[in-house]
Image: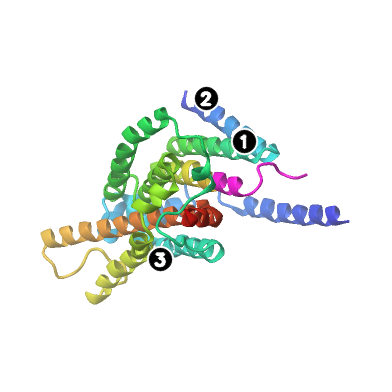
Amino acid sequence: MKKALVLMALALIAVVFIYAIGKMPPMNGKDTPDKTHVVPRYLEKGEEEAGARNIITGIILNYRGYDTMGETTVIFSALAAVIALLDREKRRRSRSSVDASKVETSTVVRTVARFVLPVVVLFAVYTILHGEPSAGGGFQGGAIIGASIIIFALVWGLPEATDRMPLGARLPLESSAMLAFLAMGVIGLAYGVHFLTFILPGLSAGVAETVRSLMLTVIEAGIGVGGGIIFVSIVFAMMREDRYELQQDRK
Amino acid sequence: MSTALSVILLLFLVTTAAVAIKLKDLLAAVIVFSAYSLMMAILWTQLRAPDLALTEAAVGAGITTVLFVVTIFKTARREDD
């Protein structure tokens, strides 16, 4: 009975989807809406309207700026949900079950991590700062930064990682993605133009160019740092185990 | 050449997706799923979307894998029938 209901629901969804696909404009068609006005507009006016040399960055931070700003709140609420369930660490050096294990990390893993991690962090910084003129950007760079800190936590243990990235340092940075976006968006309002305008009126060409580049970099860096730190906080909260923390206390 | 590569990658993609669902060992399923993300990242570059490829490689293959592995360590490794 239950199975028949599930199958009926799935069949209904399938019919709706197939009907919707039939109504979609053909792929690679010459006169579909995206080819006739969306893409030409972005390609022709993207640089002067959105203010980014890379058209993808222009779309993400300007044309679809509200969407990206919403995404920064999405990752922030993911952190909020994890913290609501698992709580913050209670002391500076947290421990996980992995740290309680008697097996030590092998020298090979330690040495490789020692040589690779600086390069990974350098690449993350490049991805964030170079996100405006080329592929990449805050989210990607932030994910790479977060991943490098997780590798550190896996190789040298959670106590060492939580000691180097203490709660006090992470707390103010977690909201930086949203705050950087809002702060840069409001500058446009102060100049009497739209929210999230990067090319400000009433400035000489050189100054406007510098301001535009700086604003985009601040947003990318904010998203990068905020996203990376949020990811680190989520993983720390998931790895930490209270019973090992208490054991450590008794020592 | 590029079409042949795309076809091979797409076949791998479908295979890894099916295997990830079927596997009862969740750790193995997570590893297969990260292989799926890696295939997807290469396919995004084939479709000339380098931004998406970077995101897929960093978030899909990297971050989700870490989150899944940590979750498996804290819960059970095998799926119940």
Viewer-proximal residue among A139 and A39:
A139
The quarter of the picture where residue A62 lies is bottom left
Subunit of label 3: A
Choose the circle earlier in sequence order: 2 or 1. Answer: 2
Element type at mark 1? helix
Kind of residue indicated by mark 1:
Ala
- From the viewer's perspective, is B13 left or right of B51? right
Kind of residue indicated by mark 3:
Tyr
Q: Residue at x 49, y 41 (%)?
A: B61
Q: Are marks 3 and 2 on the same chain?
A: no
How far apart are the two marked residues, 1 and 3, measured between alpha carbons?
Answer: 38 Å
Give the number of the disc on residue A74: none
Q: Which residue is mark 1?
A: B28
Q: Up-down: is B11 above or below A212?
A: above
Query: Residue A83 location, x and y as percent?
Result: 50, 63
Q: Are marks 1 and 3 on the same chain?
A: no
Q: Up-down: is A204 above or below B81?
A: below
- Quarter occupied by the N terminus of chain A: bottom right
Numbered disc in front, either 3 or 2: 3
Assess whether mark 2 and mark 3 are in contact (beta carbons under 8 angstroms).
no
Q: Which residues are magenta?
A: B68-81
- Magenta stretch: residue B40 in it? no
Subunit of label 1: B
Element type at mark 2? helix
Kind of residue indicated by mark 2:
Ala
Q: Which residue is mark 3?
A: A66
Subunit of label 2: B
The quarter of the picture where residue A118 lies is top left
Viewer-proximal residue among A47 and A241:
A241
